[in-house]
Every structure is written in structure tokens, then in C-alpha cells.
Amino acid sequence: MPARRGVGAVRLPHYVYILASRRNGTLYVGMTNNIARRMHEHRSGAVPGFTSRYAVTRLVYVETHDDPRQAIQREHTIKHWRRSWKLALIERDNPAWDDLYERLLG
């Protein structure tokens, strides 16, 4: 049965995330409502494309949104930022460029 919309509907979180190939390496900005599934797809190369071609698998930034429209807008905003702004965002919350995958999904 599909999820109800409106009063009493359960809203699942949506995630805006940045992946990197390495510190200061190639970046990828994405959005998903299932971060565990999406990270598995990126890490296993299950979906051919940019991240598998350039080995962009390190989760270096994540933010959560309750409203999917806000998440989509935020993803588009970050995608159009200058590279230096994306690097500053990562450095602010994750200065060591740790892979947040294990911490997030542990």
C-alpha cells in the first residue's frame, strides 16, 4: 500500500551527500531517500556512470532533510557551486576527509 500523504503521513529523511575519490579529488554531489542502498550502489559499481568510472566512493559530507523538495533544491544548489565552496563545506564538517560511511551506517 502506498504511503499516505497529509496528516499522519510518515516522512522519511532525504539525504544530500558529497562523495570524493580522495582528499581534494574528484567530487560527486547526490541526493537519495535511502543512503545505505545508494552508498552500496556507488561502492559496488552496480550502476555504471560517473562514480564508477572515476572511483568516487568516499562519503565525505552528508546532510538530512525532512522535505524531499528541500533536498532536491539543496542538491541542485550545491551542484552549481564553485568547487572551492564545496571543498569549504566538506572541510567545515569533516576536515580530515574521513569516510563517513561506517560512522553513518555503522
Image (tube, rainbow, N blue to C red):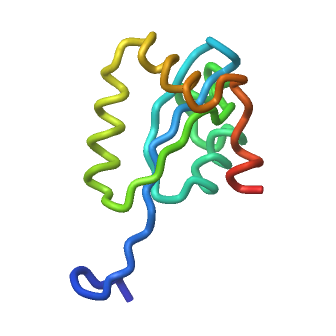
The vertical placement of 61 against 3, above or below, is: above
Q: Nearer the viewer, residue 70 or 34?
A: 70
> Residue 29: x percent and y percent?
46, 31
Assign the N terminus to one quadrant of the image: bottom left
> Which residue lies at the image location 42% right of the left edge and 16% below the top edge?
85
Count the marks. 0
**Which residue does the image show at 58% across and 28% down from the upper left?**
51
Residue 27 coordinates in the image, percent (x, y): 54, 21
Left or right: where does residue 89 sit relative to residue 67? right
In the image, residue 85 above or below residue 17: above
**Would residue 22 appear left or right of 47 to someone viewing this image?**
right
Q: Residue furthest left?
A: 6
Residue at x-position 28% and y-position 50%? 70
Q: In terms of depth relative to the viewer, which is nearer, 92 or 87?
A: 92
Q: In the rendered image, which quarter contains the C terminus?
A: bottom right
* Rendering quarter of residue 9: bottom left
Q: Is residue 51 left or right of residue 57?
A: left
Q: What residue is at 66 percent from the left and 23 percent from the top? A: 95
Q: Position of residue 98 (x, y in %)?
A: 73, 31
State which quadrant residue 62 falls in.
Answer: top right
